[in-house]
Image: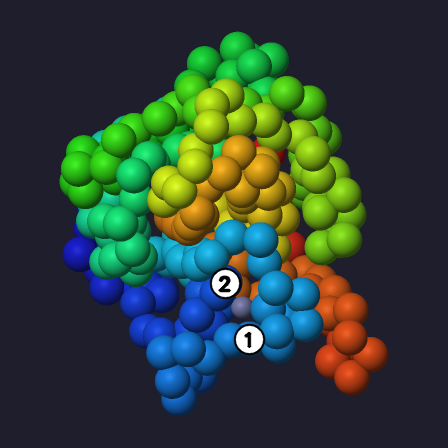
Amino acid sequence: MEYDLWRALDFLYAPGCNRCGMPIVEATSPDIQCPACIADPPVYNRARAALAYDDLSKPLVLNLKHGARKDGLRAYASWMLEAAPFVLEADQIVPIPLHWTRLWQRGYNQAAWLASSLAARSGGRYQPMLLHRHRRTPSQNGLSAGGRKRNVAGAFKVTERLDGQAILLVDDVMTTGATFNACAAALRKAGAALVDCVALARVVRPTAIEVPTPRLSRQLSIGAGVVDD
Ligand SMILES: [Zn+2]
């Protein structure tokens, strides 16, 4: 990677929301939470991403996802570990699965490549078969936060009991966290004690965060054009 690009990337290493990892300017405490997480707590415990999803990081994500480029994986795993030290606590490291028809079409799952690289760095157990996407879900592109939630609700199944285990979910891009939440719900149902999440990049200002509490009701705009499954 070119030094100039690396220097320009927006790494999300500074403390932000303790649940979803959303950057918070001058976070005053390590336990601080963003308004969206206070109003509607995520199912997962913690989520972090290495990079803000922007014009500079987007080509890295697209090279991985559509270009089958594996050359950045070692660096990406280091960055994700730096952003999410809790990776080291995981008993099992699990990629967000594609539906088998999409896996067949694409030939690989870029989230699985990231999960495998992270497992190699952290010593956690890489488990690509633990979670299944048993329902083919339409693309999340262009959906509101509520639409994304409904789209993936109940789409995932876990293949074994996980009583008391710490699970780490891995994806390439986090947008609203709807997919992480749907997977976390399935993992909790199977007995997981802790479900943490890490992505290579995340949208830092999603198109629409729907905050259900009237007092906090508002929509934060920007960040369209995310390609995800
Ligand atoms: Zn949050």
Amino acid identity at mark 2: Cys
Amino acid identity at mark 1: Cys
Q: Residue at x 26, y 31 (%)?
A: 125
Marks 1 & 2, CB-CB < 8 Å contact: yes
Give the residue number, with chain letter if any, for mark 1. Answer: 34
Residue 184, given in percent of the width and then of the height, sits at 54, 43
Left or right relative to 119: residue 208:
right
Secondary structure beneath label 1: loop
Q: Residue at x 32, y 64 (%)?
A: 11
Work out whether residue 222 or residue 97 is closer to the camera in this orientation and state it.
97
**In the rendered view, would you say 57 is above or below 98?**
below
Q: Residue at x 41, y 77 (%)?
A: 31
Label 1 CB less than 8 angstroms from ligand 1: yes
Name which quarter of the figure residue 176 lies in.
bottom right
Secondary structure beneath label 2: loop
Work out whether residue 102 or residue 9 is closer to the camera in this orientation and state it.
102
Label 2 CB less than 8 angstroms from ligand 1: yes
Give the residue number, with chain letter if any, for mark 2. Answer: 20
